[in-house]
Amino acid sequence: MISLNSLLADLRSGHDAVQIDGFILRRSGLTTYGTYIQALRELRSRRDTALTFFFEVEKLQIRLDELDHEIETCGENQFQLRRLKLERVEKRATLDLFGPALRDHYREFARFYAHAVTLRGKLGELTDARREQFEREFWLMRLKVRAASEVKTMGHVSGDTVELALSLPTDMRADLLRHIGLESSEPGCLVEWLQALAVPELKLPPVGEEDILHAQKLLGTGSSC
């Protein structure tokens, strides 16, 4: 008979590579810069959660060591002994929950870190001037994709998208309105543009044990999962 823990070990609580690369980074990023910034957001989130989980695991392990000692030295008080043993069972069960979750966060951290390093290499140094240019390109791309998606699904650009376009700086607004203007005379053009859109490719090998160990080193947590 296969144990419950053995079955549940096959379940990952986090995101898989397809979700990370496609639904989180490429979908939100659209441009190389946008994808890089999204990778940094995810990296920071995984760092914060992994550290929280790590400290919880460490505290649970310390308490388990204390409980082992307290049980050994409890004496004849059977009620106290039962309480200590029950707490030990509870702490071990909680540790079994935190351990795999922490490992999943290490795995996700490692993948977002690898993407961030690769994307930063493509972008080069982020001076204030280059950052501003990248941000303008990102928001133009985001609104162009939004407009094209609306034409594809609704047959026209929504009023909200037009309002967003009008709130942009004059030069950005002109570029976007020219793009949206295709919709009035040639509705198919925006859809064709959307279909031909080249979102940055993200190709990485699967996260391995060395990547997880490197993530632990970067976080300063060692191996506690």
Image (tube, grey):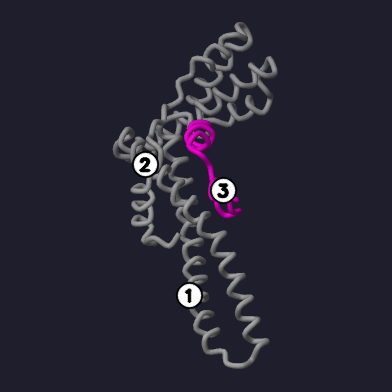
> Of the residues tagged 1 and 2, which is closer to the observer?
1
* Numbered disc 2: secondary structure: helix
- Residue pointed to by mark 2: 114
Magenta stretch containing residue 129, yes or no?
no
- Taking depth in this image into account, of 50 and 40 the one nearest to the observer is 50
What are the residue bounds of the magenta stretch? 1-27
- The residue shown at (58%, 74%) is 88
Nearer the N terminus, badge 1 or badge 2? Answer: 1
Name the disc covering residue 62, or none.
1
Q: Amino acid at mark 1?
A: Ile
Of 82 and 215, which appears nearest the observer?
82
At a point 48% along the width and 24% down the height, the residue shown is 171
Residues at marks 1 and 2 touching, judged by CB atoms closer than 8 Å: no
Q: Earlier in the sequence, mark 1 or mark 3?
A: 3
Q: CA distance from mark 1 to mark 3?
A: 25 Å
Query: Does 6 appear in magenta?
Result: yes
Q: Which residue is mark 3?
A: 13
Give me the C-alpha separation between circle 1 and circle 2. Answer: 33 Å
Is 139 rendered above or below residue 190?
Answer: below
x and y percentages locating residue 38 in the rendered image = 47, 40
The x, y position of residue 57, in whole percent, is: 50, 65
